[in-house]
Amino acid sequence: MDHRPDVTALPSLDLQRYLGTWYEIARLPMKHEPENATDVTAHYSLDEEGKVRVRNRCLVDGKVEESVGQATPVDAGNTRLEVSFLPEGLRWIPFTKGDYWVLKLDPEYRVALVGTPDHEFLWLLAREPHLAPGVRTAFLDEALRQGFDLGALIDTPHTGAAP
């Protein structure tokens, strides 16, 4: 039985302010992103339907990898989203969407902690490729408070090469 605390998203955020490019500072391992990926970025923009277009890019062995998906808020506060990276015509298929919950966000929208309610995935994101150690610690402390195991946390290298 899991005795970790429930994952709690923020009550709300300004989606327009959240859009733009974020650099991945750290993450828990995931099968869709090789452990040796560097220069990982996520760019969020609104599509013509008003949904969030997600473009993730990284370098793996010097080669650019990109995946494009769509995120849809599932709460009025825009802090809990469902994301799909399936081709557009297949996004209707049930159980193909992943959770994306914003757990902590600084007031200037410069640093964000994002996770999933099952504690499986976690990302520390920032508007710049590097983050001050004290800020990093404060955000990861929130992850620990919400029950995430950071033992396998991967620090994402940023080499300056733009993917």
Image (spheres, rainbow, N blue to C red):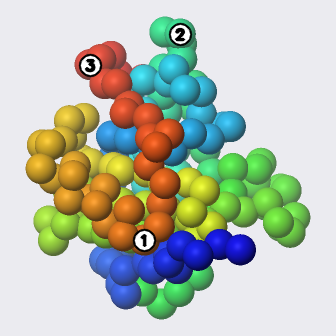
Measured Cα–Cα span from mark 2 to mark 3 = 15 Å
Q: Which of the two discs, 2 and 1, sits closer to the camera? A: 1
Q: Tell me, yes or no, if residue 100 can be seen here.
A: no
Residue flagged by tag 2: what amino acid is it? Answer: Asp
Mark 2 highlights which residue?
A: 61
On the image, which quarter does residue 73 sit in?
Answer: bottom right
Measured Cα–Cα span from mark 3 to mark 1 = 32 Å
Residue 53 image point, x, y percent: 53, 56
Camera-nearest residue between 82 and 139: 139
The dot on residue 47 is: none
Residue flagged by tag 1: what amino acid is it? Answer: Gln
Within 10 Å of disc 1 (Cα), the crowding (few <14, some 14-19, many 20+) is: some
Mark 3 highlights which residue?
A: 160
Within 10 Å of disc 3 (Cα), the crowding (few <14, some 14-19, many 20+) is: few
Residue flagged by tag 3: what amino acid is it? Answer: Gly
On the image, which quarter does residue 26 sit in?
Answer: top left
Measured Cα–Cα span from mark 2 to mark 1 = 34 Å
Q: Which of the two discs, 3 and 1, sits closer to the camera? A: 1
**Which part of the image, by quadrant, shows the N terminus?**
bottom right
Residue 116 image point, x, y percent: 56, 65
Seen in the picture, residue 45 relative to 75 is either above or below; the reply is above
User: Please, what secondary structure does the residue beneath circle 3 have?
Assistant: loop
Residue at the spot 49% in from the left edge and 33% down from the top edge: 57
Mark 1 highlights which residue?
A: 146
Q: Is residue 139 left or right of residue 74?
A: left
Q: Is residue 137 left or right of residue 41?
A: left
